[in-house]
Image (cartoon, rainbow, N blue to C red):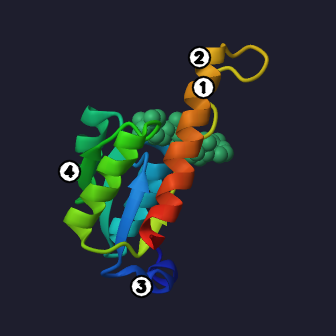
């Protein structure tokens, strides 16, 4: 990491962060930056092998959770409380389309997409404030 960027990110040192969908893609990239800057990070993801591998690689924690379900979000928030003790950073990364979009998507895929975006995105945002 360039020296100037590292200095700008120094405030992250010691911060406690939760990254949903952190096993791969953008969430993994964010986790890479956060852990490199000295933050303590917990990854939540439905993909257990990738989540474990990324967590081990980056020195993060991992919780397996299907964030399209209320139980999955509850498990994620409970693990964050247990492993981090507090939450300074919430990276609400999961979401978006799960496959073909309207009108090609089936009603079932629509519902799974809505569930992921409502449970996985909206609920974690309000939970730490309760
Ligand atoms: N990639 C892009 O070009 C792009 C563009 C705009 C917005 N986004 C948004 O950025 C975010 C990340 O995009 P990405 O391309 O890295 O995503 P991705 O498809 O690579 O998935 C990221 C992670 O989410 C996990 N995940 C999927 N469903 C899950 C579930 N039900 N519960 C828990 N974890 C689940 C996956 O296992 C994966 O590790 C998404 O919200 C996406 O909509 C992405």
Task: Tell me: residue 17, above or below residue 97.
Answer: below
Residue 10 is tagged as 3
Q: Are marks 1 and 4 in contact (CB under 8 Å)?
A: no
* Label 3 environment density (alpha carbons within 10 Å; few <14, some 14–19, many ≥20): some
First in residue order: circle 1 vs circle 4: 4
Residue at mark 4:
56
Front residue of 104 and 40: 104
| Among the two numbered marks 3 and 1 on one chain, the one whose residue lies closer to the N terminus | 3
Q: Nearer the viewer, residue 78 or 58?
A: 78
- As drawn, 92 above or below 108: below
Label 3 residue SS: helix
Instruction: Kindly identify the residue that appears in the image at 46 percent across and 80 percent down.
Output: 9
Marks 3 & 1, CB-CB < 8 Å contact:
no
Q: What whole-number distance in Å separates the C-alpha atoms at marks 2 and 1?
A: 5 Å
Quadrant of the drawing holding the C terminus: bottom left
Residue 76 location (% of width, % of height):
33, 51
Q: Report the Cα–Cα distance between label 1 and label 4.
A: 33 Å
Across and down, in percent, residue 43 comes to 33, 53
Q: Are marks 2 and 1 in contact (CB under 8 Å)?
A: yes
Give the alpha-carbon distance from disc 3 to disc 1, as whole Å: 41 Å
Front disc: 1 or 4: 1
Instruction: Report if residue 66 is visible in the image.
Output: yes
């Amino acid at each position: 990491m360039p020296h100037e960027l590292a200095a700008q990110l120094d405030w992250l040192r010691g911060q406690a962060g939760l990254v949903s969908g952190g096993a791969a893609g953008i969430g993994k990239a964010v986790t890479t930056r956060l852990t490199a800057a000295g933050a303590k990070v917990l990854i939540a993801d439905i993909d257990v092998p990738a989540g474990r591998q990324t967590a081990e690689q980056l020195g993060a924690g991992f919780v397996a959770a299907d964030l399209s379900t209320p139980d999955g979000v509850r498990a994620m928030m409970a693990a964050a409380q247990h492993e981090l003790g507090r939450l300074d950073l919430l990276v609400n990364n999961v979401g978006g389309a799960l496959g073909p979009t309207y009108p090609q998507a089936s009603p079932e895929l629509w519902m799974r997409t809505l569930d992921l975006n409502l449970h996985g995105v909206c609920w974690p945002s309000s939970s730490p404030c309760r």
